[in-house]
Amino acid sequence: MKYIKQISAYENEVITLKGWVANKREGKGIVFLVLRDGSGFIQCILTEEELGAEKFEQARKLSLESSLSVTGKVIKAEKQMGGYEVQASEIEIYQIAEDYPIAKKEHGVDFLMDKRHLWLRSKRQWAIMRVRNKVIYYIHKFFQDRDFVNFDSPIFTGNAAEGSTTLFETDFYGKPAYLAQTGQLYAEAGAMAQGLVYTFGPTFRAEKSKTRRHLSEFWMIEPEMAFYDLDMDMDLIEDFIRTVVMDVLDACKTELELLGRDVSVFDMLKERFPRITYTEAVKYIRGEKEHNGKNAIQLQEEDLAGYQAEIKAKEAEIVEREAVVNNPNEKKGVKNFNRNKIDRLKAEIKELTEKTDNIPQWIESAKNFKEGEDFGGSDETVLTRLFAQPVMVYNWPTPIKAFYMKRVEDDENFVKGVDVLAPEGFGEIVGGSERETNLDFLLERIEHEGLNEEDFLWYNDLRKYGSVPHSGFGLGLERFICWICDLKHIREAIPFPRLYGRIYP
RNA sequence: UCCUCCAUAGCUCAGUUGGUUAGAGCGGUUGACUGUUAAUCAAUAGGUCCCUGGUUCGAGUCCAGGUGGGGGAGCCA
């Protein structure tokens, strides 16, 4: 069996490929077929001359997503994606597909989400899933290369690990149980047994969030390291992000090109990531402190003006193109082309308008940011806009962070947590901390959070039997993929997204 | 839970200050065209205008409530 991915090895040879019709165009006596086999896409040329009248007639009947095998000669074709095409001498049809619902035309998200099981076949989704696969592989490789042990945490848990988030409740032999929102506490037990561990599994949050950054079910990677302090933790995070991203860029050149991802933005990863304290970050957000002569508030205002100018330009273009469409002497093809362009421009304007509607609120909230609050999505965007690299914000106010984070020496108002914010507005991709080892402090925080102390007896044991400084972090897989692929919405980063109000398919 | 926008053909969308028979493109079907890359030409089929109620001589259009969805806030990875 031969696959499209290896096509270059078979130049001028006759091979057989098996796959599906991704696209088709016809002329008299000739059919152009884009075949996809999962490993890639290739154009096949089916002519009446080569196939004979009967087979050619079958070929003409091939609908989108029909399954077939194509036997033919591999020919170099510079113009084609992948550089080759197949001159077919024989075809064997498995099935002529029914009318395929996903057309070549653009579709709305709601429609595509209902057809997610088919949407996954589209080029763009295909590329994203391939990148996801490599991201997963290189994350494992990163940790395995450094002798971390993959350590699975349970999915059913008897308690909420962090008081704030809403969890999915389920019935566990008559007792209430929750789907895990994090594996971290269990990873800590693992680190005390293995030294260096990482979990890699699904987590669940029942937040009624409707944003492009949230999923109800997502995959998280949580390393936990014995004898690591916060600085060592941050060193590892930086090494981790740099290594995995570089590996993936190298392994997924075709896919990222297909996605139109500008990979040059990742050159900055070679430089050290900025590390700033929460207190400094607040000053940047409010526009009180500048970085390289750039002020966060001004940047937002410039962005807003930029978007508004873009909208005006697109509106002007629509007027021009509408004139073409309304010209009775213009050719039909030209009119259609312009009509399509207008459709797309309108969609783009809609998106830009959403941004321009939001930015003023964001600026307001940034200006009025109160010290001690957590960052909102917009505050993160404002902050990351100042730096090329991912930004590490550390030493957070105690009340807004989880109970298990270690207090900063001599200042109980702050804890040794770190959030890593991805550039380009992709938001928080990593959250980590050094863990509290003082049992009294822990008990105090557990009580303060309103958590049930009995649920944490086992966790507290870790502080009684050979307690050591230790740290870890959590990476949201889908957010990481969004950043690497430049995805607008997190729902594209996972095969079957589970989000508020959606469980089908 | 709150703010905001939206719902018309299989899909993407028009639909004027409320007015007679609701439109276009794509896709489908049929035919014409040897090399196309969402761009040829022609013909043709295709509608519970999201639901319920109201205003009106008359509602796709206005009003109220509901349902579903997009974006954002909160919360978070």
Image (cartoon, rainbow, N blue to C red):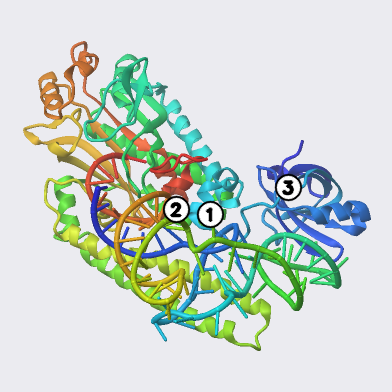
Is A176 or A266 nearer to us in this picture? A176
**SS for callout 2:** loop
How far apart marks 2 and 1 lie (CA) works out to: 8 Å
* Residue A28 rendering spot, x and y as whole percentages: 85, 66
Q: Specify whether A322 is left or right of A83.
A: left
Q: Specify whether A80 is left or right of A457.
A: right
* Residue A385 rendering spot, x and y as whole percentages: 29, 58
Amino acid under disc 2: Asp
User: Can residue A110 be seen by looking at this rendering?
Assistant: yes
Q: A399 above or below B1?
A: above
Q: Which disc, if any, is residue A82?
A: none
CB atoms at circles 2 and 1 under 8 Å apart? yes
Q: Specify whether A467 is left or right of A241.
A: left
N-terminal of the two: label 1 or label 3? 3
How far apart marks 1 and 3 lie (CA) works out to: 27 Å
Image quarter hosting the N terminus of chain A: top right
Is A19 or A131 nearer to us in this picture? A19
Q: A329 above or below A255?
A: below
Residue drawn at (50%, 33%), measured in percent from left and top?
A137
How far apart marks 3 and 2 lie (CA) works out to: 33 Å
- The label nearer to you, 3 versus 2, is 3
In the rendered image, residues at marks 1 and 3 fall on the same chain: yes
Name the chain letter of the residue that bears numbered label 1: A
Q: Which disc, if any, is residue A97?
A: 3
* Residue B47 rendering spot, x and y as whole percentages: 59, 62
N-terminal of the two: label 2 or label 1? 1
Residue drawn at (93%, 56%), measured in percent from left and top?
A53
Amino acid under disc 1: Leu
Tell me the residue that label 2 is attached to. Answer: A486
Residue drawn at (20%, 33%), measured in percent from left and top?
A402
**SS for callout 1:** loop
Tell me the residue that label 1 is attached to. Answer: A259
